Amino acid sequence: MSDEQRNTVWRFAMIFIVILLGFVAVLGKIIYIQAVEREAWLKVAEKQVPTNKPILATRGNILDCNGRLLASSMPQYYMYMDTRVPALHDNKGALFTQHIDSLAADLATIVGDKSQAEYKARITNAYRRGEKRLRVCDHRINYLQRQALLQNQLIKKGKYKSGIFFEDQHRRIKPYGILASRTIGGIYGEGGGGNSGLEKRFDEELRGEDGMSSIQKIGGRYESVTVEEAKDGLDIVTTIDANLQDIVEHTLIAKTAERNAQWGCAILMETQTGYIRAIANIDRSEDGEYYEAQNHAVQRVEPGSTFKTIALVAALDDGKIEIDDTVSVSRQPWKYFTVKHTDAHPMDTLLTVRSALAVSSNIALAKLITRSYEGSAKKFVRRIEKMGLMDSIYCEIPGADKARIDVPRDTVTLSKMSYGYSVELSPMQILMFYNAIANNGRMVRPMLVTAIQQNGEVEKSFRTETVKSSICSNRTLRDIKGALHDVVWDEHLGTAAAKKWSRKAQSKLVSIAGKTGTAQLFVRGHGYSARRHRITFVGYFPEENPRYTCICMIEDPKFPYDAGMDCGSAVRVIAEKTMAYTGCYVWKDGEKHLEKR
């Protein structure tokens, strides 16, 4: 072997020896760290935790007018276990073996969703696999359960020895279930902001401000120390009365289900204040059950014959007609240019304006309004606008539809507008108008919130807002009230008056005045259907001194149906129970009649 070859071999040998020595050194260091410095490095690893952690603010409550919870945030907790913590594996897992039975027993007793054996198997298997984040309980536990578990001897040793820790979640609950659910609204996920209803409208006030905690070493242990306290959200006090809400909701569900209707809506308003004491929305699901899905109360629809009152107020107040003026109607349709107007209650006679409203004659209203505003339809619409119906901010529910009452391009459209087609109003807006009649002409904004408070102390209060001090003259008001009385009490003409087979809106216990409405449904691709309708009754009570105004609207009921028989009777039941509950009237000697106190 030449010298050059020997030198090459020597160089490769030296390189190999250096690599080998380096490998031995690294291996030795690893062994040293594992055997000698293990505890020290584990303590360093434990320190590598976030130094700051947010403290979530508790979302404020939504209360009814009597302080009862309609929506609240309740603290709940997920329980986790890091089975890899060294303390559980020291001395061949002595700590784990010593406490696993008592831990499983406490979980079975306090949480109660699994047996002791099931909890022991679940935790033991995770321990053997070395799971970092075992969810010990499938479901969240409440505050009292958490406090009880904290007394367990293993959990008492803290997160870094037991591996057990809790993560809090604020769950939004509604103690009354679906009661006014769509109006109260919802939030995004757990702890998210409001996504609908009052939760969304008052999200800024309800959400509060998160605080901050810091992980600090105190007395040889790492503890969470509050740096900045969380500011809990404010409470919202609503106008809703949970008892009245229950009355309205159950009445609506019963009537809507009886007619197997698509949806129903009912609202109860306090006449003078505009306070909404109850608001119910019911939708039919595919399986036939009813639940709250949409807030129909603030979604606009063609109002049908409830709009006749609005049209007549405009014509009466403009001096176009008098309440005792007459108009001829017949069993045959009245053809106006290309449109045929028909009546649901056909007759060959002369009707006064007052009786035309009582019997709800489409022909009479079409003739009266076209004669009054032919060539000046814009004036008709502008007169209605002056009543305040186009007020854009009429309640606190986000996304509430504005009224749609456009100036018609032709008198044919005007003729259909006279009895509630080619216009759109929400049930809330219809209610607002009739409430103004009950309130001696003063239109007030419907209110759902009266105060914002913190720990029972009022931070901000809201007062009744007047939309219009008077929607019409006193004379017009007197005339229209007389016509609305006849709707319920004229047993020959009134569409909501008692008949042999139904009491409709006519009550023996409380006097009600109001108006029925029936509108054909527009079916896309087919036009208006003569067999499918939206029925309504809106009225106020007691008629002689109104305290409440109420509307009931039912969509697509199954035959046989009638606005007075179905919606009118629903309002009658609500009125009778409301008057009894509020103490305005009392039962006398156990008999089924009421008297004024």
Image (cartoon, rainbow, N blue to C red):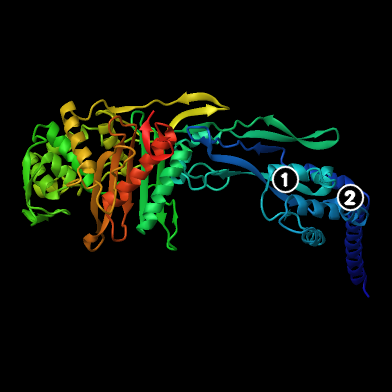
Are there few (<14), some (14-19), or many (20+) residues within 10 Å of tag 2? few
Q: Secondary structure at mark 2?
A: helix
Task: Establish if 194 lies above or below 130.
Answer: above
x and y, in percent, of residue 205 in the image: 51, 32
Q: Is residue 422 above or below residue 398?
A: below
Can the viewer see residue 420? yes
**In the displayed structure, does residue 164 sit left or right of residue 425?**
right
Q: Which residue is mark 2?
A: 38
Instruction: Choose between 255 and 444: the one closer to the eye.
Output: 255
Q: Point out the tag, 1 or 2, that comes first from the N-terminus.
A: 2
| 438 left or right of 343 in image | right
Where does the image place residue 107, in percent across and percent down from the top left? Answer: 77, 52
Horizontal and vertical percent for residue 442?
A: 27, 28
Which quarter of the rendered picture does the N terminus lie within? bottom right
Q: Secondary structure at mark 1?
A: helix
Residue type (three-letter) at the residue carrying disc 1: Gln
480 and 200: which one is in front?
A: 480
Amino acid type at image mark 2: Arg
Extreme-bottom residue of the structure: 1
- Distance of label 1 from label 2 (alpha carbons): 36 Å
Q: Say which quadrant the C terminus sits in.
A: top left
Q: Are marks 1 and 2 in contact (CB under 8 Å)?
A: no
Left or right of residue 577: residue 375: left
Of 36 and 203, the residue lying toward us: 203
Q: Which residue is mark 1?
A: 145
In percent of width and height, residue 31 lies at: 91, 56
Q: Residue furthest front?
A: 589
Q: Which mark is residue 163?
A: none
